Structures are given as structure tokens and as C-alpha cells.
Image (cartoon, helix red, strand yellow):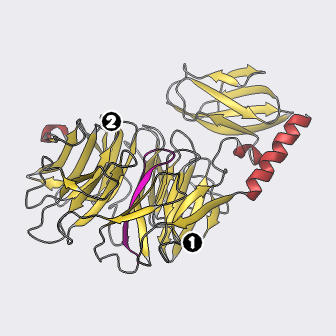
Amino acid sequence: MILRLLLFLFLSSFYSQAQFWTERASGFPITSTGLSKIHIVDNNIAWATGYDGLNPNNNVQRFSTTSDGGTTWNAGTIDVGDSALGISNISGVSATTAYIAVHPRAAGQQGGVWQTIDTGNTWTKQPSAAFNSATSFANVVHFYNFNNGVVIGDPAGGYWEIYTTSDSGSSYNRVPSTNIPAPLTGEVGYLGQYTQLNNHIWFTTSAGRVFHSSDMGNNWDVFNTPLSDFGGTSISGDITFSTASKGLIQDNAGNLFITQDAGITWNPVNISGTGFPYGGAIAYIPNSSRVVSTGGDSTLAGTSYSTDDGITWINVSTDQHVDVAFLDEDTGYSGGFSTISTLDGVYVYTDNVLSIYDQLATQQFVLFPNPSSNFINILSIEPIEKIEIYDINYRLLIEYRNTSLINVSDLQSGVYFIKVNSNATWSTQQLIKN
């Protein structure tokens, strides 16, 4: 009992003393440069692009990168041979190598994909991702590893212009129209608006649809969502996935919609608690129920987080945040605005509230992994006396005693409730079975 009490006191103390974000210098030399389109490579390396925080319509060809977990950031310019071309997003694969999607901003310009292998000192176009049609417009580049990547553009020639590569971009092959659902009339994608998990990737469109590939972009499905547009003037949204099947949409008013089937169906999330999502960017901690929301709009600016798939929210701050990305429960970043080159511009996650262990300070037990397809662990401060599993209609299915590891492989995919009795106290949480 003394050990359990010390653990609880340690977690409580750690919880109260930590700071969710620590602001670092993005390295941008011009004040009010925003940092966005963050791509995290690993626990040490991340890349991001810059934009004009005072007038976002101004074209900015800048990037910033870190190789020490966000402590220091080094910024540089992106020279693609035409200062009028726009930078859609950036995707890194190491501390030295990254790729950018480049789009035209005026008639007669031609975008595509550029690569750096020297930490951004020089950028070289990869010509086999052609993007040479009059309607070509590269929205997204993403590399899953050193070799495999995908570039996603607007429709050109009657179907979506999507290229894949398996040789680091030395050669790209356009995905055949038979592998991609046809675009709707006038439907386009948006700059850097996508989310990715393992070999899965999703991108959103002006028709409120979500395209999904489970094989690095070679074959695609498309699903409708509750949003009419993901980047309109009155309605917009962001998307994030925790697993291949579980994802969230956040619209610009802070409404949430959840899917448990990779985007086929979406249901509203009934938000509770004193906090709320901020309607800007949203990011899951992969393979968890923990999610972070940020807002950059002056009327809805801030950060909040949820540990139960967006149902209950805790507000963190009301500072402007223009992007958010998380690799795991320890590594996450959000964009801010530079003041001088040695101050401000990027927020680094330095808290522990997204750790499953720290959740014990506020919850009686924690399930992990959740969702799960086989076994789940139950972490509890008090000894577990009994576990009960109920279906969605709250019918008792299984009982366990004196164990913290249970097998759920025989359960059908869906939502269940886990009731845990420890120290004569019952507590309930939701489990998602893949």
C-alpha cells in the first residue's frame, strides 16, 4: 500500500509541475513568420515550412528543421528556381533529406516535387513526377521511409494526379485512373491537408470527401463525411487517425466526428467537460485514445487535449497555434510565430499528461493498447479484483478475476465497456476491438 501511495503521489506531483508546451525559436529571421505543415520523422528529427503570419497570401519559401527533439531549430530558404512558386508541404526522411510539394501560383508556372539531401542548402526537382498539365497542382508529398513516397495533386486529365515512388523519387509512376475513385465536378484537394499512419494515408477535398489508401497510395477508396468542404471560407476541417480504422474530423467551429471503420461512417462526438476542441488542427497520439486540438483563429485560439477520443476535453492555453503533430506520447510540436530569430515560433511538447502512466493521477485505471485486436493490459494503482466486459447494449459478456492482462481476440470488432473493480470501487472505460 505504501508503494502504491508513493506512485500516486509521484504521478500527481509530476502532473502538476509539468508544462504542456515550451516555446522555442523557430529560427526564422523575419518576425511574425508562422511555422506549419510539421512532419515528424522520429523522436529527434522534424521538418516544417514557414509562412507570413501577418498576410498569409504573401508567398514564403522557407523551412525549419530540428535534429535534437525540438530544442534547437535551424531555418533556411527553399530555392526552387522561381520565387513565385508556392510550397505546399514538406516531408522529411532524415536529418539531411526531405521532399517538398510545390504548386503554381500563376498561369504558366509548373510545380512538382523537389528533394534536398543536404539539410535544405540545395533543392533539386524530381522531373518524373511531371505535374505538367494546365490543371496540375501538387498538394501533398509524403515519404513513408527512405524509398517509398506518394505525391497527391488535383485532378488533371479527368482523374486525380497521384504519383508513387519506390526508389527515393528517382522515378515516379502515375497511379492509373482505375485505382482512384473519380473526382466530382470542381473537386480539388488542399495544401498539405492529409494524415498518415504506417502504410495508410488519407487526404481531404473541397467536396467534403476523404480519400484513403492502405498501400502507400497505389489504390484508393473515397468516403463522404458530415462536412461539405474541408477548406471553404465558411466551413473547413482537419482530420487525424489513431489506427487504421479509428479517426476524428474536427471542423472550424470545434465540432467533432468519429469513425471506427477507416472513414466509411462518421458519427458526432458528444463533447463534455469544461474544455473543448479549438477548431484548427487536430492530432491523435497514434494507437491511443489521446488527442490534441489547437486553434490559430484569433476568436478561437488555444490548445486542449482529450484522453477519451474527444469526449472530455481539458483546456491548456489560449495562445495561437497554427498546426499540431504528434509522433507518440512523448514527441509533439505545434506552430507559433517568430518574434526574432532567437526567440519564439515553435511549441515543443514537454508535459506528461498524454502518458498512460500519468493518466493514473486522474483515472482509476488505464487500458492499453486501445484499440486492440488481441490482448489488453489494465494498469491500476490498486490491485484488480474483478474485470467485466459488456457489449454496446451493456450486456455482460466475460468476467475475469485477479488479472491485469485479458484476451479480447474472440470478440467481434466494435465498441465495448470494461468495468474494473479495485479496492471495492468500480470504474468503467470504453474499449475498441479491431
Q: Measuring 52% from the left and 38% from the top, which residue is drawn there?
A: 287
Magenta part, dominant SS: strand
Q: Is residue 128 left or right of residue 24?
A: left
For badge 2, the amino acid type reads Ser
Would you name the residue on which mark 1 appears? 319
Q: Quadrant of the N terminus?
A: top right
Q: Relative to residue 179, is residue 397 depicted above or below?
A: above
The stretch drawn in magenta includes residue 49: yes
Q: Relative to residue 260, is residue 155 depicted above or below?
A: below
Q: Is residue 235 visible?
A: no
- Between marks 1 and 2, how big is the CA–CA gap? 36 Å
Q: Is residue 293 left or right of residue 77?
A: right
Quick one: label 1, few (<14), some, or many (20+) residues within 10 Å?
A: some
Region in magenta: 38-53
Q: How far across and how far down the image is residue 169, in percent?
A: 21, 43
The nearer-to-camera label among 1 and 2 is: 1
Q: How far across and how far down the image is residue 238, in percent?
A: 41, 57
Would you name the residue on which mark 2 appears? 214
Q: Measuring 55% from the left and 65% from the top, which residue is drawn there?
A: 24
Q: Is residue 77 visible?
A: yes
For badge 1, the amino acid type reads Asp
